[in-house]
Structure formats: C-alpha cells, structure tokens
Image: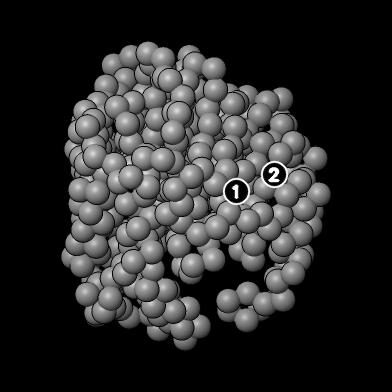
Amino acid sequence: MDRRNFLGLSAAAAAGLALPSGFLKADAKPAKKKAGDYSLIVIGDTHYDTEPDTVYHSDYNEKVEWLNRVQRAEFKRNGDMWKDRCRRMIERGRYLMDDSTKMVLQMGDLIQGDCGNPDVHVKMLSDTMDYLKTRFNGLPIVTVVGNHDIRGTGAEAAYHKYMPERMTAELGKPVGSVNFSFNIGDDAYVVVDFNKPDDDAVQKLIDDTRGARNLFIIVHGPVFPFDSGSCRWFYHGGESEAHTKARLHFREEFARRSAIVLCGHVHRTEFADWYGDGGRITQMTFNSVWANDSLGKYEISAEGAAQYGELRKKITALDNGSAPKDETALFNEYRPGLKTYSVSPAAGTYLMNVSGKKVTVDFYAGDSIGVSERFILR
C-alpha cells in the first residue's frame, strides 16, 4: 500500500455536538471503539432540488416527450421531499457522528441535474455540497459521480471540472479525475465512475491498493445486475462482447480482493453477499430518496437468493412504454453465489463502523431514532 496516500482525517468538528434528547436515546450503550476503529456517515442518492423548479430548471430543454414527462415528475418529487422529509433525514444523520467519524460518503446522484445550463449545474452541485458540509459540521464530504450528476446541457464537462477540485479540497490531497482513491488507516477506498468506465485508470487504482486491510469500491451503479426494469444499468452491464469481458474481469478482480462495494442508484436499501470467481464480493446499496412517508420504515420486499430477479418479472412495461426483455439468464449467472440477499425500498441514513475485526452498517430509516437494521459486511 502507498503510505503517502493515507488520509489523516479528524472529526474534531463533530466533538461536543449537542444532541437532541430523542436522538440521544438512539444508542444508549454505543460500542466502545479501539484505537484505529472509525465510522463513516453514508447517504445514498439525494437528488437535491428545491421548489419552485425554476430555481435550477428554468433552462431545462428535454425534447423527448416521455423523458420530459418522467423528469418533470422527478422535479416535483424532489421539491416535495426536500421541503421537509429529506431535511429531517439529514438532521438525523448528523447526530450519528462521534469523535471517530472520519467523513460523509455520498453514493452519487447528489443532485437532480437537468439544468440545461452548465453554470446553473455547477451552482446546483456547489449548493448541495455546501449544504451537506454545513449540516455535518465541516466533515469531509466525498461523492462519486452518478448519472444525474452529469445529465443536461454541458453538465458532464461542468461536473468533471468542478468535482475533482472540490474533492481535492475535501480530502486534502490531489484528485485529478472522477476516478480516484484515498485511504483511511489501513483501508483503501477506490471511487469509480460507472457512467463511462475508464478500465485502465480503475485497474491502476486497484493495483495500487495491494496490501490494504479492506478494499472498498465506491460506485454509483451496483456491480451486480439489479432486480428492476433497467437491470443492465450496472457496472459494465452492457450486452456487447467488450462490456461482458470487462464485467467478468472486474468481477474477478473485486472477488479475489474480497471487495466491499458501496453503491446507490436503485433507490433501495439492498444487501448482497456473493461468493464466486474464487473469492467474495459484498455489496451494500444505500438509498436516501425519501420520496414518500412509507419509505421511512424498513420493510423487506424480497429476501434470499431464490428471490433474486423475481421483482423484475412483475414489471409489465418500462418508462418508455416498451416491454422488459427476459433477463433470466443474467440473474441465473449470479444467483448460485448469493449467500445473503435482501431488498427494501426504505430510505434513510447509514452509519458504517470499521474495525480490525468487522465492518457493519447501521441503517436508520427516514429519521428514525433507533437502528432499523444492522448489516454485517465482514
């Protein structure tokens, strides 16, 4: 491992934070942390936006009718949830911090995008990062590029210029692109763009982490096909021969390193522990799109390897009106290796605890006081 890249982060800004009495009761007897143990706050897709939609979308210019319809519905959803629910959710998340908390990880789709103007797009990114920075008492905010983060006229170029500079400031080390890495103690974190994978860059980042205690892959889209209409929208999920070759290559690379994948995109809280390719990949999917009140409760909609791929079979039409393709063979490729699998539509905030012996994630659905579910990643 390259010790020069080790990240020495402090959560001193979080120390002494006054807790509301309700949140103080959430974990009456928190586990004692040993030297070197640490925690991270994790939030999933946020699709930050506001009402009225003219604040960020006055130049919106989508010409495809069905996309225009779907995206304008998203503006309405976002404006509604960010009036109250998502702000309460973030407020709950900030009280998960203690003096061991190193940073906040955000899993992409930080913003809605769809601004139609690159300058407005940068303002949307900056406004969101500044909001989170303030709410989490100055902790570093680290994000990975999502599809919405580069969506709209001039948006991709704007993101690729703004965010590496912002990540440089957040991490206190040079970040030259949307693919980058950092370390916390003996653990390596590799941040990957799944929109336009740069295989050479990602391979080098992985190679440079040899010797790390844990390898975390942070990527917006999952590395396994997800049980939804757009199941191919995962890392190298395309059907071409080149995508298939790259998918199998990186699946083996991640497995032999026993990688822990942290992702978002699907707007669900999912957990998958997969054994194959001579190793293991554990994937945790995070969701912070609190679109309606019901998503503030943790309820499982599918559980166990036998259920993997079954939710998609219930879909009769995609957003564009077409019928979904039969992808049974794709799910069958992964199902035998799934030792643990669960899916919930719930949204909220997460606390990841990392120690020398284990990695766990505590999920707080909505703005719930207590832990809704604990996931054991290692």
Residue type, numbered disc 2:
Tyr
The residue sitting at 81% across, 49% down in the picture is 306
Give the label on residue 225, or none.
Answer: none
Element marked by disc 2? strand
Q: Quadrant of residue 249?
A: top right
Q: Is residue 366 above or below residue 22?
A: below
Image spot of residue 77 (x, y percent)? 42, 74
Report how far apart the C-alphas of labels 1 and 2 lie in the structure: 7 Å
Q: Is residue 130 above or below residue 80?
A: above
Image spot of residue 71 (x, y percent)? 43, 76
Q: Which residue is mark 1?
A: 270
User: Cβ–Cβ below 8 Å for labels 1 and 2?
Assistant: yes
Q: How many marks?
A: 2
The residue sitting at 48% across, 44% down in the picture is 370
Image spot of residue 102 (x, y percent)? 32, 30
The residue sitting at 37% across, 73% down in the picture is 80
Q: Earlier in the sequence, mark 1 or mark 2?
A: 1
Image spot of residue 55 (x, y percent)? 22, 75
Residue type, numbered disc 1:
Glu
Element marked by disc 1? strand
The residue sitting at 56% across, 51% down in the picture is 269
Outermost residue to the bottom: 65
- Residue 321 visible in the current orientation: yes
Q: Which residue is mark 2?
A: 341
